[in-house]
């Protein structure tokens, strides 16, 4: 085991919603410092912070106007350095979000670029001749609408794969790359422990005359030529002892080996394929079989060469306990056991360790997420009378409601008025209550994290999927110097699991389960109740 992150568990903090130290309703850096002991007790090794840079907040910090400054609502650079120091003093590592596909339209580079065709910064972004009736092409942005926004003064349009307020940087311009690389070194020299690279697979685009067929986003998904830029980044990262995880949609599980093996550009990448949905719009859930097949394919394709980043929740998706579980503490525990023992580095998204659930949105005014609001507008324009339901069902804001700390007003997140409403279930689901309850989701997470880190087999061992086509049961083996069997029923059905003889004839012993009725050992046919989750060790 050569790399520290291969035996580590990470924790993702969405600063805006974590803990507010000064009562303005917005989480902040001092708030994170206050809660470091909580993370230490949870047992995680590193923190990934969502953006806390200066930003007009059109996309909550993913629209950066100054890469080397802290947004005032989160604190200042001295606070950040205090956080880094405090984290390191507790042996917690800290990685930052690196958003280099685009900047804010308020970034000085773009402010300059907009001034005219001759401005030295013009070429920092992508500009093409255009008129209102004729944009350079018909490509569509992730947030809805065209990827081009017209600038009437110059009769040109600029390019953006997200919101119009997030113009894409022109990576073909060497000056841009130089600036970005310098900025990266500046943070690494400060002593941070690595980066999560936002939307990194989009930095290269196809020629503007590329014709879209099935996948509307193909023209900016891991496009040829990206390797040159990734190699540059790799060389910088290699000079430091840091970990890197890329958000790399469009990089297939087969190609991900090149991205993440020992000569790979990055240490690991987040796949964005596993949220396989089923059900009618507005009532969609995750399809377990689809999810399982994606995960198993990544486990197999990365094999012993590449490295996975494991996650079930983040700031962009609904709560897993709502879309795959049944919102009980039992299902939250089953989901934890299901994914924490896969091969790779697990990430836990804040509140996931409590079994937090989706928010019951009743009014569009409760929504902040830009993409949800524009989707809602589109539905209204189409006169869809289920607009609210459709727009809020899968919104990112489910994950962004404030962290639930205790039973006091606003879950103890703030003494003021929270920027996004607190989920009303905070009176039951919160850190204080769950800390005292030995059977809570929180204490289950603590045990699983400790177990995962204690057994080397969970880091280095191989992965073998069992019952591959079972629609309800996710079960697999991890094999190294020891062998473990993970069995989970991710459904509301009582099922019987029949294992092959080569498995059941071995001698197994239960290590941990989410229910007292769990069998002590493995037999040929095992009755498994809804959301039962068991972990056995071969003796
Ligand atoms: O998300 C980007 C993202 O999800 C896309 O890159 C993805 O590839 C696409 O939706 C296809 O599935 C990141 C952040 O996580 C998100 O919060 C930001 O809004 C976004 O980038 C823009 O910076
Ligand atoms: Ca605050």
Image (cartoon, helix red, strand yellow):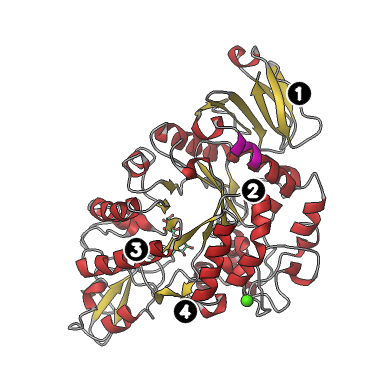
Task: State the separation of the CA atoms marked 3 and 1.
Answer: 52 Å
Task: State the separation of the CA atoms marked 3 and 4.
Answer: 24 Å
In which quarter of the view is residue 423 placed? bottom right
Task: Identify the residue position indicated by label 4 in the image.
Answer: 56
**Label 1 CA crowd tier, 10 Å (few <14, some 14–19, many 20+):** some
Depth check, mark 3 against mark 4: the one in front is 3
Q: Main secondary structure of the magenta part?
A: helix
Q: Is residue 512 placed above or below 184 in the rendered structure?
A: above
In which quarter of the view is residue 131 placed? bottom left
Q: Secondary structure at mark 4?
A: loop
Task: Identify the residue position indicated by label 2 in the image.
Answer: 43
In x, y percent, where is residue 509?
71, 22
| Circle nearer the N terminus (3, 2) | 2
Q: Secondary structure at mark 1?
A: loop
Task: State the separation of the CA atoms marked 3 and 2.
Answer: 29 Å
Q: Secondary structure at mark 2?
A: loop
Image-quarter location of ligand 2 = bottom right
Q: Is residue 433 placed above or below 475 in the rendered structure?
A: below
Task: Identify the residue position indicated by label 3 in the image.
Answer: 185
Q: Quadrant of the C terminus?
A: top right
Task: State the separation of the CA atoms marked 1 and 2.
Answer: 27 Å
Question: Which label is found at residue 520?
Answer: 1
User: CB of mark 3 within 8 Å of CB of mark 2?
Assistant: no
**Label 2 CA crowd tier, 10 Å (few <14, some 14–19, many 20+):** many
| Circle nearer the N terminus (2, 4) | 2
**Magenta segment boundaries in residue numbering:** 450-454
In x, y percent, where is residue 22?
66, 78
Q: Secondary structure at mark 3?
A: helix
| Circle nearer the N terminus (3, 4) | 4
Task: State the separation of the CA atoms marked 4 and 1.
Answer: 55 Å
């Amino acid at each position: 085991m050569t790399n520290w992150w291969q035996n580590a568990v990470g924790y993702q903090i969405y600063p805006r919603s974590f803990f507010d130290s000064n009562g303005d309703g917005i989480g902040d850096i001092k708030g994170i410092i206050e809660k470091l002991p909580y993370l230490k007790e949870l047992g995680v090794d590193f923190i990934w912070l969502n953006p806390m840079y200066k930003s007009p907040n059109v996309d909550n910090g993913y629209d950066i106007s100054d890469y080397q400054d802290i947004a005032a609502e989160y604190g200042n650079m001295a606070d950040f350095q205090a956080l880094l120091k405090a984290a390191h003093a507790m042996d917690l590592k800290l990685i930052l979000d690196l958003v280099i596909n685009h900047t804010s339209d308020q970034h000085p580079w773009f402010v300059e670029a907009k001034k005219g065709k001759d401005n030295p910064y013009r070429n920092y972004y992508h500009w093409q001749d255009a008129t209102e009736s004729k944009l350079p092409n018909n490509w569509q942005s992730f947030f809805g609408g065209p990827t081009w926004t017209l600038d009437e003064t110059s009769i040109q349009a600029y390019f953006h794969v997200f919101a119009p307020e997030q113009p894409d940087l022109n990576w073909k311009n060497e000056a841009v790359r130089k600036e970005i690389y310098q900025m990266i070194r500046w943070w690494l020299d400060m002593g941070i422990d690595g980066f999560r690279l936002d939307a990194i697979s989009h930095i290269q685009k196809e020629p503007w005359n590329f014709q879209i067929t099935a996948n509307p986003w193909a023209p900016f998904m891991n496009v040829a030529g990206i390797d040159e830029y990734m190699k540059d980044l790799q060389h910088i990262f290699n000079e430091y002892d840091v970990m890197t995880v890329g958000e790399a949609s469009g990089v297939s599980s087969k190609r991900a080996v090149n991205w993440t093996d020992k000569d790979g550009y990055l240490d690991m990448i987040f796949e964005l394929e596993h949220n396989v949905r089923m059900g009618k719009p507005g009532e969609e859930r995750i399809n377990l079989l689809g999810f399982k097949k994606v995960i198993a394919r990544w486990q197999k394709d990365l094999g012993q060469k590449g490295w996975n980043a494991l996650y079930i929740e983040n700031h962009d998706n609904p709560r897993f306990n709502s879309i795959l579980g049944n919102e009980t503490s039992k299902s939250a525990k089953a989901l934890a056991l299901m994914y924490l023992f896969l091969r790779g580095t697990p990430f836990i998204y804040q509140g996931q360790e409590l079994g937090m659930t989706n928010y019951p949105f009743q009014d569009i005014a409760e929504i902040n997420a830009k993409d949800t609001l524009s989707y809602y507008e589109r539905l209204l324009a189409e006169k869809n009378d289920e607009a609210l339901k459709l727009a809020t069902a899968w919104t990112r804001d489910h994950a962004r409601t404030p962290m639930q700390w205790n039973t006091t007003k606003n879950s103890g997140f703030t003494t003021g008025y929270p920027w996004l409403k607190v989920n009303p279930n905070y009176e039951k689901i919160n850190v204080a209550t769950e800390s005292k309850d030995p059977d809570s989701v929180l204490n289950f997470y603590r045990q699983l994290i400790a177990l995962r880190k204690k057994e080397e087999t969970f880091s280095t061992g191989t992965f073998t999927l069992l019952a591959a086509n079972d629609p309800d049961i996710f079960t697999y083996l991890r094999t190294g110097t020891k062998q473990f069997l993970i069995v989970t029923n991710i459904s509301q059905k009582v099922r019987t699991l029949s294992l092959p003889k080569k498995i059941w004839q071995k001698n197994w012993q239960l290590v941990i389960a989410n229910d007292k009725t769990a069998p002590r050992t493995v037999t040929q046919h095992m009755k498994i109740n809804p959301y039962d989750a068991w972990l056995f060790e071969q003796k």
